[in-house]
Amino acid sequence: MKLPFIFPIMLLISTLQAQTLVFTDHEPLGNMRTHVTERFFRLVEQESQGRIRIDAHWNGEISSSYDAYETVHEGKKANMATVVPEYDSQRMPLHQLFKGFLAGPSGEAQVALIRKAYKTIPELTEELHRAGIHPVLVATGYPVGFYSRHPMAHLTALRGQTWRTASFWHIGYLENAGAKNMRIPWGEQVTDSLKSGAIEGIMVNIDSGKDINAHKAAPHLLVSQELWLGHIYLVAMNLDRWKSLPEKDKRAFERAADKAYKSMGKTMDESYGQMLRDLESEGCTVRQLTHREVSDFVTAVRQGEVQEKWVKEKESEGVPHVRRVFEKLRALVIESARF
């Protein structure tokens, strides 16, 4: 007769014994990437049978994107964080290579490439471990788009114009396309510069452009899912905290990640389509580039030359394994995306 009470009691004991991990993200909950992360956390709690609970803080509540690494590395305010390697290029030089590829696969193929990269290029995880963090999930964002004040029939129209982009890779590619890059702090100043005509357009991931209403001042967008951002977003845990987890809890994280990856590609595709529809509904003229146009652009901006120059610079600085990692990653991109 007492059996029905056993499960609630066991659940209560499990809840009391659960360990809570504090997580911080710089973006608000509700967009594509944070939706994926939130689902991953639910899966972690399920796979651990309630032994692990994630106390998630969004929209920069605990740390900004630029100090997320320091926050999780220190491990006091948060055990986990969304870390963007591009903002810590000195500590994570090998991870800069992802963004060095202007074009790549999209959706499920992109997820598969990134997973294969971490499985077959151990230097990537080793670099993160040297930095004191462990990746429990790896994601990317929306693809790159070109928001222009005036219609552009082709990307060749960039020649002679002044644009704004941020990544050192993309600055190099814009300049090789014949454009001049103007350095402007991100935010209202970029939108104001578009309105005034100080710059003709911006090269940025399409969601960030929408966030600052760039499409209101530069309502002509050229985009392709193949113009992948290459902007890696790591859901990372403090390395000491990861090492302290029981093996069964580490396996719970890994099973949760496997499940999250299976739906990630579909979420990315659906969110991309919705983003374009939203932009069009707000008056933006959107044209999706063909594979040939993207391929021609990659050739025109001399991607290989820019990559080789960077690799040589890092070799001269003594960055270990940089050429080996570059060649392995390049092979994966070529294999999956035909670029």
Image (cartoon, helix red, strand yellow):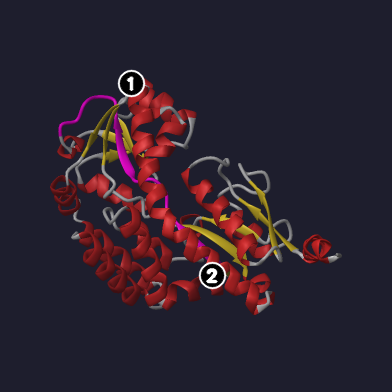
Is residue 314 left or right of 17 when viewed as pictured? left
| Distance in Å between CA atoms under marks 1 and 2 | 43 Å
Q: Residue at x 32, y 26 (%)?
A: 280
Element carrying mark 2:
helix
Is residue 26 left or right of 32 when viewed as pictured? right
Which amino acid lies under the numbered mark 2 shown in the image of this protein? Answer: Glu
Residue 83 picture location, percent across and down: 54, 57
Residue 274 appears in view: yes
Quarter of the picture holding the C terminus: bottom left
| Label placed on residue 283 | 1
The foreground one among 61 and 310 is: 61
Which amino acid lies under the numbered mark 1 shown in the image of this protein? Answer: Gly
In the image, farthest residue toward the front: 1
Residue 77 picture location, percent across and down: 73, 56
Does residue 201 sit above or below 300 in this rendering?
above
Does the magenta portion include 255? Answer: no
Q: Which residues are magenta?
A: 135-153
